[in-house]
Image (tube, rainbow, N blue to C red):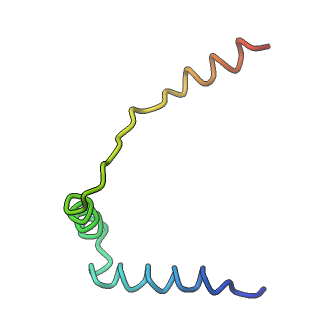
């Protein structure tokens, strides 16, 4: 199977990014939170979608 060059580039970036943070998930998340805080973009946090509502809606239609 032929490798997609875009996927290869993303994998290369991801490997370099995790290596920069010593493959520590806590450090990676902290760095991403810091980057998010420094950006001037608005962050939208949505509430959880309850599974029960989806199931009830599905079965009430039949």
Between 43 and 19, the residue placed more toward the observer is 43
Residue at 63% x, 87% y is: 5
31 relative to 56 in the view: left or right = left
Residue 34: image x %, image y %? 20, 63
Above-or-below relation of 49 to 16: above
Give the residue drawn at x 44%, y 79%. Answer: 14
Residue 35 is situated, as x and y percent measured from the top left of the image, at: 25, 66
Q: Which residue is drawn at 30% across and 55% down?
A: 41
Say whether residue 21 is left or right of residue 3: left
Q: Residue 21, located in which quarter of the rendered image?
A: bottom left
Residue 42: x and y in percent read 30, 49
Task: Please give left or right for residue 19 compared with residue 7 in the image.
Answer: left
The answer to whether 37 is drawn above or below residue 47 in the figure is: below
Residue drawn 56% across the image and 20% down it: 53
31 and 43: which is toward the camera: 43
In the rendered image, which quarter contains the N terminus?
bottom right
Looking at this view, name the residue that lies furthest to the front: 40
Quadrant of the rendering where the C terminus is positioned: top right
């Amino acid at each position: 199977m032929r490798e997609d060059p875009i996927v290869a580039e993303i994998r290369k970036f991801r490997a370099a990014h995790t290596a920069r943070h010593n493959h520590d998930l806590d450090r990676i998340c902290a760095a991403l939170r810091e980057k998010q805080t420094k950006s001037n973009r608005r962050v939208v946090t949505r509430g959880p979608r309850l599974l029960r509502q989806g199931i009830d809606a599905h079965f009430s239609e039949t």
